[in-house]
Image (spheres, rainbow, N blue to C red):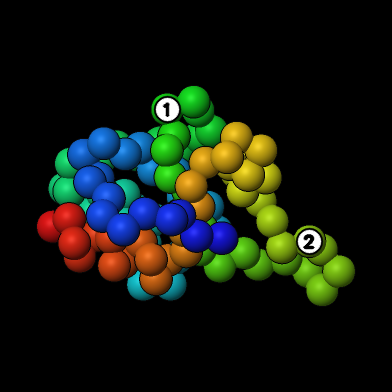
Amino acid sequence: MQANREILDLSNECLLFTGTLTGYTRQEAQQLVIDAGGKVLNYCSQAVTLLVVGVIDKGLFEELTTRKLVWAQSKSIAIIGEAEFIQLIKRNI
């Protein structure tokens, strides 16, 4: 689940979040993206270029996925985890 991108300019990206972030609230993470010049959506859209996946809590026998994750995979949208998101934000602020 990684975006294969060495240097990513957030001003050219539109991010979507799914799952629970552990280091930031969803609102804080979204504001960091905006502060770095990027865009944020709260729904699946053709404009989305990057999905950030936090912790996905499911029951013991439920598949660890979300509607947004399934959608992003079907559209070949780049997907990164929270640790990669934090590194990305640090490079863009």
Using the image as rendered, state which of residue 64 and residue 7 is in the foreground. 7
Name the residue carrying label 2: 63
* Count of marks overlaid on the render: 2
Would you identify the image quadrant in which residue 48 lies?
top left
Q: Is residue 35 left or right of residue 72?
A: left
Q: Secondary structure at mark 1?
A: loop
Residue 38, position in %: x, y? Answer: 25, 41
> Foreground mark, 1 or 2?
1
Residue type beneath disc 2 = Glu
Q: Residue at x 29, y 67 (%)?
A: 87
Q: Residues within 10 Å of mark 2 (few under 14, many from 20)?
A: few
Q: Is residue 62 left or right of residue 79?
A: right
Would you identify the image quadrant in which residue 60 lies?
bottom right
Q: Earlier along the polypeptide chain: callout 1 or callout 2? A: 1
Q: Residue at x 57, y 40 (%)?
A: 76
Quarter of the figure with the N terminus = bottom right
Residue 21, position in %: x, y? Answer: 45, 65
Using the image as rendered, state which of residue 78 and residue 14 is in the foreground. 78
Q: Secondary structure at mark 2?
A: loop
Residue 40, position in %: x, y? Answer: 34, 39
Q: Is residue 50 above or below residue 4?
A: above
Q: Which mark is residue 47?
A: 1
Q: Residues within 10 Å of mark 1 (few under 14, many from 20)?
A: few
Using the image as rendered, state which of residue 33 and residue 26 is in the foreground. 33
Q: Residue at x 78, y 61 (%)?
A: 63
Residue type beneath disc 1 = Ala
Q: Residue at x 69, y 56 (%)?
A: 65
Q: Which mark is residue 92?
A: none
Residue 9, position in %: x, y? Answer: 22, 46
